[in-house]
Each structure stands twice: as C-alpha cells, then as structure tokens.
Image (cartoon, rainbow, N blue to C red):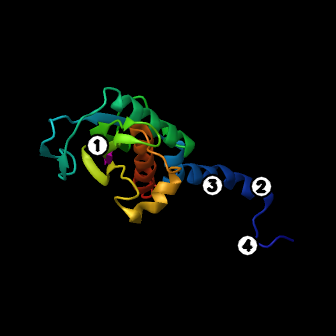
Amino acid sequence: MFSKDILSPVRLLRLFPVLAMMIVLSPGVLFSLGDIWVEVERLETGGKFVTCQYCGRQIKTGHIHKDAETIIKKRVQDHLIERGIGLKESKGPSPFVNILVYRFEERKGGNFAVERPAGVGFHMHLMEGNVVGRVFVFDEDQQALSQNILKIGKFFKRGGKWVTADQLAEEGINAGLDHLLEVLE
C-alpha cells in the first residue's frame, strides 16, 4: 500500500534525533546557544599617540575614569544577554570580545549646560585565540548642535541633552556589537 518513496511514521521517528542534532550543531544556532567571553582592558599613556596592540590602528589616549572597565564590561554583558548570547567565565577556544578602552572622560556640567562634554574612545575586537576577526572603533566627544548641524539626528535621539560618558559608551557598545556579531549570525 505504501510507496517506497513515502516515509512511514516509524522511519520519521528514527530521523528525528539526527535532524535535532543537525539543528543544534549548526553554526548560527551553536553560537546563539553558546557562550562568549568579554575582556576589557585600559590603555593609559597620558594623551600620547600609540598603536593598538591588537589591530594596529592609531590611538590618541586620554583620561580614563577609574570605573571605566567595570562600566563597559557590565554594559557589554547586558547587551549580549539581551541578544540571547550566553557569557563565559573565562577565555577558551571560542570567540571572545576584547575591548581596549583608551578614553572615558565624564562631562563637566549638567544635562543642559556643560563646561566639557563627555568623551569615550575604545576598540572592540572579535577574537578567536590570538587572531583578530573583526574590529569596531568608537571614538566620540559629544558636540553642541551649533558645532555640527549634521549630527542633528543624534541630538534629538539623546533628548537634546548632554549625555554622560556611560550613556555615550552605551551607544558605541550597541553599534559595536551590531558590527562584530553580524558575522556570527
């Protein structure tokens, strides 16, 4: 009665474990279910120009807030969890994110008037072992709208206020993770 080309329910049940393993072990799913390590370092050289030890790009260092590494690591981990990516407790053979902070300067002033705006600079490296896979560079000082009218979109997105270094770093972290993780999806 049954054609040899049609799979019977018994044969389908035998294929289920194989199909399930293929889905779980596919690269995109494996990463979304897997873990990633986040490493944050600081690079302070007192305003000098130096070369990034990971990607070879030039960096002009600046002042780094004492809690910058903790703030950035927490923000990155929170955003990874929001994206459904687990966190590892230590480095391993799987990909990891290395962040080199070279500037994290808090604004001097309030929401609507500042003597000095916030400024943040960091490199995000997607690495596997000692090999750099992808790099994202974030280096920004908030500017008044009168200084650069072309950034009117950012001005309104920020509510027309002067942001903190933490808020500025979070913008960079979001953009950086979008860039780094698109190759792993």
Q: Secondary structure at mark 2?
A: helix
Neighbor class of circle 1 (other Cα within 10 Å; few <14, some 14-19, many 20+) is few
Is there a contact, CB below 8 Å, between mark 1 and mark 2?
no
Specify the farthest residue to the right.
1
Left or right: 128 in relation to 22: left
90 within the magenta span: no
Q: Which residues are magenta?
A: 123-127
Query: How far is disc 4 from disc 2 in space, using C-alphas?
Result: 14 Å
Q: Quadrant of residue 114?
A: top left
Amino acid type for the residue under numbered disc 4 = Asp
Q: Which residue extends farthest top?
A: 66
| Residue that carries the numbered disc 4 in the rendered image | 5
- Residue visible at 24% across and 44% down? 130
| Residue depicted at 13% across the width and 45% down the height | 50
Residue, disc 3: 19
Q: Nearer the viewer, mark 3 or mark 1?
A: 1
Residue that carries the numbered disc 2 in the rendered image: 10
- Give me the residue at 41% from left, 44% from top: 168
Q: For mark 3, give the secondary structure.
A: helix
The disc, 4 or 1, on the residue closer to the chain's N-terminal end is: 4
Location of residue 121 with respect to 67 vertically, above or below: below
Q: Residues within 10 Å of mark 2 (few under 14, many from 20)?
A: few
Say whether disc 4 or disc 2 marks the residue closer to the N-terminus.
4
Q: Secondary structure at mark 4?
A: loop
